Image (cartoon, rainbow, N blue to C red):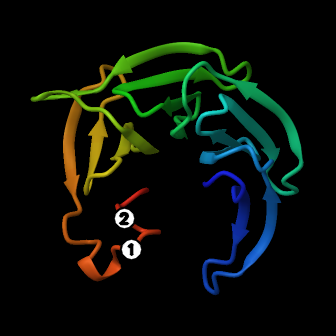
Amino acid sequence: GLRGRSSLRKVDLQTGSVEQVHHLSSSIFGEGIVVYDNKILQLSWTSRLGFIYDKNTFEQLRSVTYPTEGWGITYDGTRFIMSDGTANLYFRDKVTFAEVGRVTVRDGNGTVTRLNELEYIQGEVYANVWQTDRIARINPANGQVVGWIDLTGLLSPEDHSSSVDVLNGI
């Protein structure tokens, strides 16, 4: 993320060293990525552009557009599931990226907004709720929150800084 500093990177998990990098244009704020079919799809936050890369070479194969902000994205094996910071999850065709459906995410208290980083795990969508210490477990068929993961205390007061102010990911 961050305008002027966004990139796609392959990092050695043992050492943290960057093994491969593709820098985005300085006007693009990079957001969520998902790996599928030997490709990587990367969203941008406000530019309404997504970029599809070859997984191994990071060569940009094409771009896609969407009419919302881009926050998080995951893949259920058939279609993309995307968030834009609202209570909506958008289902998108993996070839055309056209919207093929959507659900509004709700729990017992109403709609759940600020759905950020997404992961598809055993038939559920896990969504980090930005600026909270919670991850929602969502039924993608109807948008119902089926459970919460509470991460309160994981980010200690000592870890809060100007660059790390909230949990942001899964």
Quarter of the figure with residue 151: bottom left
Point out the image quarter for the C terminus.
Answer: bottom left
Q: Residue at x 61, y 54 (%)?
A: 2
Q: Is residue 19 above or below residue 76?
A: below
Q: Residues within 10 Å of mark 1 (few under 14, many from 20)?
A: few
Q: Amino acid at mark 1?
A: Ser
Instruction: For marks 1 and 2, give the CA distance.
Output: 6 Å
**Relative to 97, is 25 on the left or the right?**
right
Q: Which residue is mark 2?
A: 165
Q: Residue furthest left?
A: 108
Task: Tell me the crowding category of disc 2: few under 14, some 14 to 19, or many 20 or more residues within 10 angstroms, Cα based.
Answer: few
Tell me if 26 is positioned left or right of 60 in this view.
Answer: left
Do we see residue 119 in this rendering? no
Q: In the rendered structure, which amino acid carries the disc numbered 2?
A: Asp
In the picture, the quarter occupied by the N terminus is bottom right
The image shows residue 111 at horizontal and vertical percentages of 22, 25
* Residue carrying label 1: 161
* SS type, badge 1: loop
Q: Is residue 64 above or below residue 26?
A: above
Q: Answer left or right for 135 relative to 32.
A: left
Task: Give the residue drawn at x 33%, y 73%.
Answer: 160
Of 138 and 152, which appears nearest the observer? 152
- Where residue 158 appears, as percent x and y from the top left, is 29, 82
Q: Image quarter for residue 103?
A: top left
- Tag 1 and tag 2, C-beta contact below 8 Å: yes
Residue 68 lies, in percent from the top left, at: 55, 23
Residue 113 is labelled as: none
